[in-house]
Amino acid sequence: MKPRDAYAAFVIWVVLTALGEAFVLRANIYPLAGNEFARDVDDAFRLLMALAVPVFTFVVTVLVYSLLRFRRNGEPAEDGPPIHSHRGAVWGWFAVTSGLTLLVMVHPGFTGLLELRESRHQEMVVAVQAAQWSWNFTFPGRSELEKVKDLKLPTDTKIRFDVTSRDVVHSFWLPMYRMKIDAVPGRVNSVYVATEEAVSYGENVNVRVQCAELCGTGHPRMQVRVEVVERPEFDAWLAEQEAG
Amino acid sequence: MAATALIARTRDWAFGPILRGLLTGLVGFSLGAGFTAGVRALAGADAIAFGPVIFGGYWFGLAGWLLGVGVWRTWAREWLGMPVDWTMRNGWQRYFDFTTDHKVIGVQYLVTFLGMFFLAGLLAMLMRIEHLTGGQVLFSPSQYNYVMSLHGITMIFVAVAAVIGGFGNYAVPIMIGAADMAYPRLNALSYWLAAPVPVLLLATFFAGGFDAGWTSYPPLAVENRDGQILFNLAFITLGLSSIAGSINFIVTVTKLRARGLSFGRLPIFVWGVFAMSLLGFFFTQYVAAAMMMTLLDRLFGMVFFDAAGGGDPLLYQHIFWFYSHPAVYIMGIPGLALALEVITHFSRKPLFAYRWVVGGILAITALSAVVWAHHMFTAGLSDIELFFFVTTTELISIPTGLIFLGALGTIWGGRLWLRTPMLFALAVIFNFLIGGLTGIFLADVFTDIHLQDTFFVVAHFHYTIVGAGIFGLFAGIYYWFPKITGRSYSEFWAKLHFWWMFLGFNMTFLPMFWLGLNGMNRRVASYPSDLEALNVVASLGGFFLGAGFLVFLANIVVSWVRGPAASANPWRARTLEWHTSSPPPVENFESEPEVVGHPYDYGTPGAVHAMLAGAEEEGG
Ligand SMILES: [Cu+2]
Ligand SMILES: [Cu+2]
């Protein structure tokens, strides 16, 4: 072990980090994002990856460099240097990992919670009742009994879903809006989704409601194709539901 | 009867203890079941209802089994003032007996839980066949849910018990210079309590299976098929075994350390087992309570988790995760500590920043008590709860980082000997790095909302529990194989197994991060066909991973039978288990060991960890 090793490893780390950052910042690994909130979640995901890259490459560099540089063919004849600790390295490590942790805790940790809180506005309330194995929706101005099994939503509307369950625990997941809340018997959990453009399941499979909590035999197929349509079309559809 | 029992022992049949246990277990079960049915008949209820009769019979059956297998002979007679019989057999028969030797118990745990590991692994192969296409391949959805649930809980039990039960038992007493565990009979009891667990899990097949996953949330777990009852009983039983084992480790490490072995000189693996025993002791009771409350709801109409009756399904989730978050450390930390142990000896350099690493493990132990609700971020928690659990969960990164500091600081500038245990130990660090970093995405509510209950979570916990816990288990198997068997394994086949497992593991689980992010929820027999391509990659990786264990089994079996003899200390490692013969004698050391220095003083000429009274200094 010479200073040369530290320099070499440092250079490798910088190069790997640059490559890694170039990859995670450009790679489009995300599913369709249907609104601003979803895009913000993806940004947070990307930021966490960008912060994880230097940590990942640091550990991998030290591991692989040591593996190649410090390996012995066969049983080592002598011991390594008796280094028990190193004040600077330890405190440096502690400071950097603590700093990164606090950073992530504040952003996107706390800031994400704030955004979640600020997203709570509604222009429309939809009651959602989960049951083995279907989703039942009650739209504004309707009685509980008038439930619809497929789901159309109007564009550019802030919607609150009041989610509960009739039997076991389910989970109401809208992948394209990065939103999910459990449907728990005896409780009403609300989530807020602001729709934007028109889009339908036919265009992308993540335009769906999917049950995400294991609920028995029908769990994987406990899904509803969603269609986000312009307001007039939505109103016509709703009227049709009433007539039917 | 006392005298005849003593005489009979010496000519006992190999499977005598187990057969007697089965017999008394059957008697106990009949008594309990009959009693339950009788009470129910008197109360005017359906007398032979499956659930209550099984439940009532089980506890008496379990007591009968334990008495018959050895508790009566070695222990209970003492309570009645009768002489007890401690004679243990010497040959292979001791592995089928209520043996108090911690080394035998360690091997019993290892073999039992490796068997369960392979069984659950085969179930995983079936699941990967099902996932070859988005539609139906092998199973109906309910069959898939059963296979998935059985795979899950079996692997969870393996992860909880294999390293601690196996190597904790085998190695910890020797590493601290003790002759045995503090409570040898309690130790035997722990194992024979665990032995019915795989039987119960397999018996679920005959009770209609169960389909609520290893987490088994009510109300589903109260309403589903009756296999669930056996699941709940199995969880409680393994819990009792864990609590007994944890008490034993805590007392053993506290009271039986060799002269001179201060806590500041404790090998890091012992620290790992000790800290996780604290968790096992304090927290296992909660999951047992959750299981028992589920049973009471199901069988006797109680309403702990029934919203309609005034209960709350979320109550279960809180109690369950109050144990099960600490439990993920019980599954992961022993493997990590074992990896650090191996890395140190095979780098021939002191464990870097030993005190900080120990502090890290203890900080994780403490913090693990206050993070449980991060498994419930989408359950409908209040903002203040979300805020609290994000904060505590993120904080765990800091002590976890110290474990990486220890590993990296040790190998840097060391003299690396890349034998198979070392390769597995380094893989633990690599895998746990991925598992740890992806955990941050789940610790943060904002990103977790989307990822919760998807394959992203599946990938994450396989990287931590398999990547650290199970890779650590295999590091331990190769590391201590010469000590346990007195023979050497084949290095070539062992290295082949390592690379095979390492590549197969990453090929299986890396694609799952993307799958989860892109809309594949977990615990599904079918999924959107857009996600087929990477599912096929994961499945092929899984089959490859599974096939690699044939190499492992062949190597281990052949080497155990006729591998070349191993010396007392083939690795020239410094901890105490390498100061005695391979395999060690019954009470571990020919003479009393005395610890005079740190176990990791590599590179310091003349530094000595321990001396055996009357023997020449060795292992310096
Ligand atoms: Cu559902
Ligand atoms: Cu957790």
Image (cartoon, coloured by chain):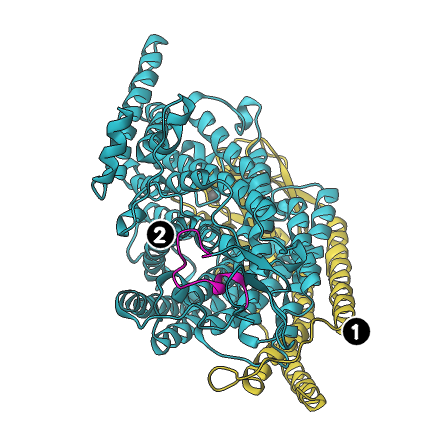
Chain colours: A yellow, B cyan
Residue B494, compared with residue A16, is above or below; it is above
**Range drawn in magenta:** B574-590
Question: In the rendered image, which quarter is residue A104 located in?
Answer: bottom right
Residue B180, compared with residue B420, is above or below; it is above
Q: Image check: A232 left or right of A118?
A: left
Pointer 2 residue: B116
* Quadrant housing the N terminus of chain B: top left
Q: Nearer the viewer, residue B350 or B214?
A: B350
Q: Nearer the viewer, mark 2 or mark 1?
A: 1
Q: Nearer the viewer, residue A239 or B304?
A: B304
Disc 2 from disc 1: Cα separation: 46 Å
Q: Residue at x 32, y 11 (%)?
A: B41
In percent of width and height, residue A190 lies at 65, 41
* Quadrant housing the C terminus of chain B: bottom right
Task: Determine the main secondary structure of the stretch shown in magenta.
Answer: loop
Q: Image check: B92 left or right of B373?
A: left
Residue at the front extreme, as displayed? B614
Residue B517, compared with residue B232, is above or below; it is below
Q: Is residue B205 visible from the viewing direction of this image?
A: yes
Q: Residue at x 34, y 37 (%)?
A: B227
Pointer 1 residue: A88
